[in-house]
Image: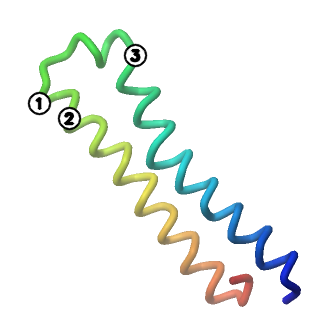
Amino acid sequence: MSWIGAIGRSLLIVAFFFVGTVWIPDFVLKLDSIASAPSLVRDLGVLVIWGGGFAGGLYLLRIAQRRGLV
């Protein structure tokens, strides 16, 4: 794998984790239905979304590792 390819793949991984664990939970937290909910519901909802992005990213990284992509 070339340096350019490695840098590109690493940027894709960072971008995926940024979107999945930062941007999407923040976007959901600002929705009116979530923002007006009690704090426990808000926190649990965002935790589930954050956990899904994080666990999904780890799962996809494991699959990519098995296939020799990373």
Which residue position holds label 3?
Answer: 31
Q: Position of residue 36 (x, y in %)?
A: 23, 10
Q: Secondary structure at mark 1?
A: helix
For badge 2, the amino acid type reads: Asp
Say left or right for 34 vs 31: left
Q: Secondary structure at mark 3?
A: loop
Which residue position holds label 2?
Answer: 43
Say left or right for 70 vs 28: right
Q: How many residues crowd mark 3 within 10 Å: few (<14), some (14–19), many (20+)?
A: few
Which residue position holds label 1?
Answer: 40
Q: How many residues crowd mark 1 within 10 Å: few (<14), some (14–19), many (20+)?
A: few
For badge 3, the amino acid type reads: Leu
For badge 1, the amino acid type reads: Leu
Label 1, label 2: how far apart the Cα atoms are: 5 Å
Q: Secondary structure at mark 2?
A: helix
Q: Nearer the viewer, residue 4 or 52?
A: 4
Mark 1 vs 2: CB contact within 8 A: yes
Label 1, label 3: how far apart the Cα atoms are: 16 Å
Q: Quadrant of the N terminus?
A: bottom right
Q: Quadrant of residue 49?
A: top left
Q: Residue at x 70, y 63 (%)?
A: 11
Q: Is residue 45 above or below residue 48?
A: above
Q: Is residue 30 above or below residue 49?
A: above
Q: Earlier in the sequence, mark 1 or mark 3?
A: 3
Q: Residue at x 72, y 90 (%)?
A: 68
Label 2, label 3: how far apart the Cα atoms are: 13 Å
Q: Residue at x 30, y 19 (%)?
A: 34
Say left or right for 48 vs 69: left
